[in-house]
C-alpha cells in the first residue's frame, strides 16, 4: 500500500485486516516515517517491509499487487508498478493529464490496472444498471440525468475514524519536488492558468471528487463517452471550495445537470444521482463514502395512472470491499478490471472540458490539453 492518509486509515487498512486470508498486507510506503511506524505496528507489517521510497517497495520480494492511495496524480506511481508487471488498484484520480493516461494505456500491462471508482462496485448501482437495461421496465427513453453532491468538511466526515495526527516529519525538499511536479502536470493539462481558480477546480473538485459521479453515470447507462459541456458556474463569489453547477449533454443529446456544493455546516455528506426517463425514474442515494456498510438506496419508479409502480432496494454490501475483492481476482486469476485506464481518460476529457467551458464563459482562452479537449 502506497500512501497512508485518510482513505487508507479509514477504509482500506481496516478492510484488508478484516478480509483475513483473502488479501495479506505485505508492505507499506509513505513519505512520513512516523505514519509508517504507527500503521506498520498497528497492522503487523515488519520494519523491513516499510519504506518511504516507492521504487524500493515495488522491488521487494513477494509483492503481488499495489494499492495506490497517495494525493495528487497517480500516473507516475501507477506507471512504475505496471512497468514491473505489478497489478495496480489506483485510487482516483488516475492522472492529471491525458498524456499520463495515454502512457499508461500503452503499457503491455495496461489491463492490470483497476481504477478505484468504488461506487461502480456498489450492488445498488448494479441493480440500477439492470433496471436501465430491462426492456420490460417501462422506463422508455432517457431524457435527463441529475447529480447533486452535498459535501461538508472532510474533518466532519472523518471525525469518526480517529485518524493519526498529521505528521510533521516529511522531508521539505521532497514536498517541494512533489509540489513542483504537480504544478508541472497541471500546466500540461490547463496551460498557464493552472495556478488560478481553474487549477484548483480541476485538481481538487473535478478529478478529485466529481469523477465518481461521472463513473456512476457510465456504469448505469453504459455510455462510454465524455460529456459535452454547455455552461459552468461557480458561486458564491470568492468562496472556496464553492458550489459548482454544470449543464452538459451526452453524445445522444441526453441532458446532464450537475450540482456539487461544498457546505461546511451541512449535517452529513449526501449524493443523489437520478435518471429521468419518459416512463419513470431511477434514483440512487449514496451515504458518506468513508462510513462503511451504510446503505445505498435505489428507487425505480415506473408507469402512470393505474400502472404506476415503485421498486426499492438497499445495498449494505460495502463497495470498497467488493472493489478490493475484484482486485484480488485481477491479481490472482487475471479477471479483467471493471473500471480501468479508459474510464479515467474519459473523465479527464470531461473535466478538462468543464474547465475550458468555465474559462470561455469568463472570456478566457484556456491552454494546455484542455484547450483541445
Image: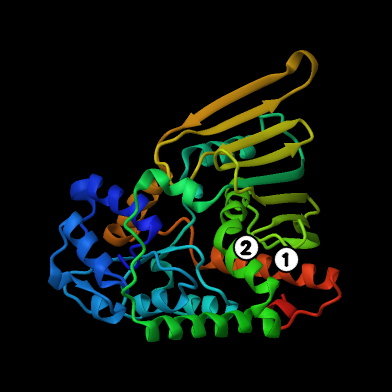
Label annotation for residue 328? none
Q: Number of marks in the image?
A: 2
User: What x and y, as percent, mark residue 303?
Assistant: 74, 23
Mark 1 to mark 2: distance in Å?
9 Å
Answer few, some or many: residues within 10 Å of disc 2's Cα (few below 14, many 20 plus, some between 14 and 19): many
Residue at image point 62% right, 51% down: 222
Residues under numbered marks 1 and 2 in contact, where contact means CB atoms less than 8 Å apart: yes
What kind of element bears circle 1?
helix
Write down the quadrant of residue 317 in the picture: top left
What kind of element bears circle 2?
helix
On the rendered structure, is 364 left or right of 95? Answer: right
Vertical arrangement, residue 330 with respect to residue 74, above or below: above
Residue at image point 69% right, 57% down: 242
For this rendering, which residue is in front, 151 or 357?
Answer: 151
Q: Sequence order check: which comes first, mark 1 or mark 2? A: 2
Q: Which residue is denoted by mark 2 in the rendering?
A: 206
On the rendered structure, is 64 left or right of 295? Answer: left
User: What x and y, as percent, mark residue 148?
Assistant: 67, 45
User: What x and y, as percent, mark residue 155?
Assistant: 47, 51
Q: Which residue is denoted by mark 1 in the rendering?
A: 354
Answer few, some or many: residues within 10 Å of disc 1's Cα (few below 14, many 20 plus, some between 14 and 19): many
The residue sitting at the top extreme is 306
User: What x and y, as percent, mark residue 131?
Assistant: 60, 35
- Quarter in which the C terminus is drawn: bottom right
Vertical arrangement, residue 243 with respect to residue 56, above or below: above
Write down the quadrant of residue 266 in the picture: top right
Amino acid at each position: 500500500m502506497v500512501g497512508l492518509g485518510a482513505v487508507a486509515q479509514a477504509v482500506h487498512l481496516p478492510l484488508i485486516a478484516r478480509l483475513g486470508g483473502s488479501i495479506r498486507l505485505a508492505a507499506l510506503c509513505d513519505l512520513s516515517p512516523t505514519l509508517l511506524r504507527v500503521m506498520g505496528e498497528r497492522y503487523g507489517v515488519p520494519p523491513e517491509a516499510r519504506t518511504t521510497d516507492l521504487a524500493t517497495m515495488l522491488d521487494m520480494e513477494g509483492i503481488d499487487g499495489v494499492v495506490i492511495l497517495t494525493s495528487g496524480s497517480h500516473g507516475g506511481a501507477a506507471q512504475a508498478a505496471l512497468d514491473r508487471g505489478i497489478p495496480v488498484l489506483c485510487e482516483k484520480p488516475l492522472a492529471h493529464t491525458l498524456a499520463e493516461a495515454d502512457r499508461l494505456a500503452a503499457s503491455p500491462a495496461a489491463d492490470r490496472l483497476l481504477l478505484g471508482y468504488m461506487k461502480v462496485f456498489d450492488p445498488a448501482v448494479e441493480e440500477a444498471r439492470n433496471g436501465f437495461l430491462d426492456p420490460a421496465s417501462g422506463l422508455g427513453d432517457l431524457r435527463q440525468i441529475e447529480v447533486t453532491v452535498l459535501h461538508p468538511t472532510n474533518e466532519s466526515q472523518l471525525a469518526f475514524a480517529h485518524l493519526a495526527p498529521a505528521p510533521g516529519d516529511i522531508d521539505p525538499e521532497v514536498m517541494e519536488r512533489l509540489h513542483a511536479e504537480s504544478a508541472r502536470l497541471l500546466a500540461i493539462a490547463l496551460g498557464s492558468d493552472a495556478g488560478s481558480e481553474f487549477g484548483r477546480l480541476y485538481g481538487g473538485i473535478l478529478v478529485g471528487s466529481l469523477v465518481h459521479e461521472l463513473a456512476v453515470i457510465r456504469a448505469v447507462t453504459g455510455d462510454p463517452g465524455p460529456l459535452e459541456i454547455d455552461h459552468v458556474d461557480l458561486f458564491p463569489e470568492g468562496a472556496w471550495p464553492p458550489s459548482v453547477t454544470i449543464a452538459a449533454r451526452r453524445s445522444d443529446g441526453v441532458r446532464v445537470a450537475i450540482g456539487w456544493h461544498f457546505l461546511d455546516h451541512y449535517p452529513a455528506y449526501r449524493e443523489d444521482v437520478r435518471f429521468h426517463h419518459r416512463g419513470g425514474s431511477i434514483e440512487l442515494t449514496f451515504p458518506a463514502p468513508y462510513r462503511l456498510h451504510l446503505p445505498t438506496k435505489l428507487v425505480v419508479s415506473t408507469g402512470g395512472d393505474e400502472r404506476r409502480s415503485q421498486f426499492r432496494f438497499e445495498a449494505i454490501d460495502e463497495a470498497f470491499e467488493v472493489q478490493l475483492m475484484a482486485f484480488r481476482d485481477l491479481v490472482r486469476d487475471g479477471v479483467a478490471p471493471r473500471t480501468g485506464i479508459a474510464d479515467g481518460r474519459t473523465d479527464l476529457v470531461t473535466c478538462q472540458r468543464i474547465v475550458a467551458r468555465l474559462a470561455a464563459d469568463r472570456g478566457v482562452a484556456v491552454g494546455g490539453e484542455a484547450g483541445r479537449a
